[in-house]
Amino acid sequence: PTVTTGRAKFIAYDYDYVQTIGNKHHTVRVWEVAPELLRAETAKTNLNTVQHDYLINAGYSWWTDAAQKQPYSLSILVSEGKVLANAVPHNQATGCLIVYDDNTAAVKQVADITAEQDVRFAVGGMTIASKVLSAEEGFTGTYADVLRETARVVLGWHPIKQRVIIAGYSKMSAARGRDLLLELGCTGGITLDGGGSALMREAGRDVLTSDGRDQFGCVYIDM
């Protein structure tokens, strides 16, 4: 880990999460990250074009041209105060993890990130902690598939540690992601895009990947 003033700014470890029903064990990769290390970047076509040793996929996205794989964002993305994307699915406020200029962080429902003051970093998805708010955020009908068990990265805020908790696993439902973040001490959290869009890269090696990386952008750790 990178250490400053006796407190680790980045820690990575395996966490043994025990499923509530069935007593099944899941080995989940977890990062604890100081909020000031978080950055974001857009991809030219997919995440293979983004070169960072520590990165995860961002929020929901789609294609302007599926044949040419030109992605556009369906979510919020801010890095170093610059708004890279300011869209939300279904034109409804959705879950967003925000880091402010003073390094405080919050998880809240946001429709327009420019309405927030002093935002240095933000990434949007769907609220899963402390409750899964899929219906409230418009993820119903065909969009309810965001709840399924799939490859997924989730983010939460741990107010005591003052750390963003990032966790990736290949068989994580939204409900399981909620339970995991709460178990790890988070008071709020979101899920990012999943399925074929999930990616978690650690020390240059993909520890969580899936069948596609056609994403508008990524969140990375500036170490």
Image (cartoon, helix red, strand yellow):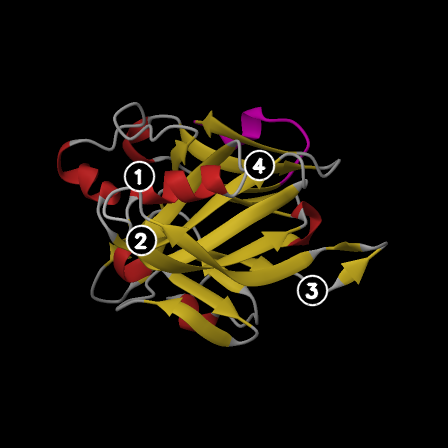
Q: Amino acid at mark 4?
A: Ile
**51 left or right of 180 in image:** right
For the residues labelled 4 and 3, the Cα–Cα distance comes to 19 Å
Label 1 vs label 4, nearer the camera: 1
- Residue holding disc 4: 98
Q: Give coordinates of residue 192: x percent, y percent.
A: 39, 47
The span picked out in magenta is 111-120
Label 2 element class = strand
Which residue occupies the foreground of this view, 28 or 118?
Answer: 28
Q: Amino acid at mark 1?
A: Ala
Is residue 200 in view? yes
Q: Is residue 116 magenta?
A: yes
Pick whichever of labels 1 and 3 is earlier in the sequence.
1
**Residue at 28%, 64% in the rendered image:** 69
Q: Give coordinates of residue 144: x percent, y percent.
A: 19, 37
Q: Give coordinates of residue 219: x percent, y percent.
A: 52, 55
- Residue holding disc 2: 194
Q: Amino acid at mark 3?
A: Met
Which mark is drawn over residue 175?
1
For the residues labelled 1 and 3, the Cα–Cα distance comes to 31 Å
Whether label 2 touches label 3, CB < 8 Å = no
Whether label 2 touches label 1, CB < 8 Å = no
- Residue holding disc 3: 223
